[in-house]
Image (cartoon, rainbow, N blue to C red):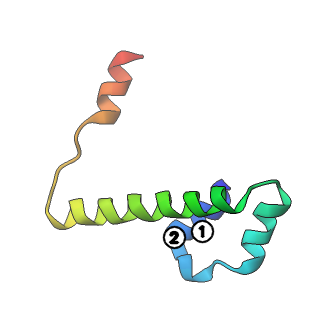
Amino acid sequence: MLDYVTKVTEAAYRTTAGDVQLLRDHGWTEPQIAEAVYITAMFAFFNRVADAFGIPPQGYLEMNAVTK
């Protein structure tokens, strides 16, 4: 699944029916595959909107490092 969503992120137009069939062959269900695509697309959308409006990173990674 991670290879697939990476492909969706980097070049969604290159995804094929064979990519989706491979996920099915590994036990992923249609709703799971669809949700992975939706989540991946939404993160890309939100990142582009944030970048377009110049919204700075919120420091979540830094906060996580402090709490470890």
Q: Quadrant of residue 43?
A: bottom left
Q: Quadrant of residue 62?
A: top left
The answer to which image quadrant residue 63 occupies is top left
User: Pointer 1 and pointer 2: residues touching (CB < 8 Å)?
Assistant: yes
Q: Amino acid at mark 1?
A: Lys
Residue type, label 2 = Glu
- SS at badge 2: helix
Residue hosting label 2? 10
Q: Is residue 37 left or right of residue 61?
A: right
Question: Where is residue 5 shown, x and y percent of the image?
Answer: 59, 61
Q: Could you classify mark 2 by the number of other residues whose Cα lies within 10 Å: few (under 14), some (14-19), or many (20 or more)?
A: few
In the image, residue 60 sits, relative to residue 24, either above or below, namely: above
Please report the residue visible at 76 percent of the width from the left and 62 percent of the height from the top. Answer: 23
Give the percent coordinates (x, y) of residue 3. Answer: 66, 59
What numbered label is drawn on residue 16?
A: none
Q: What residue sits right under mark 1 in the picture? A: 7
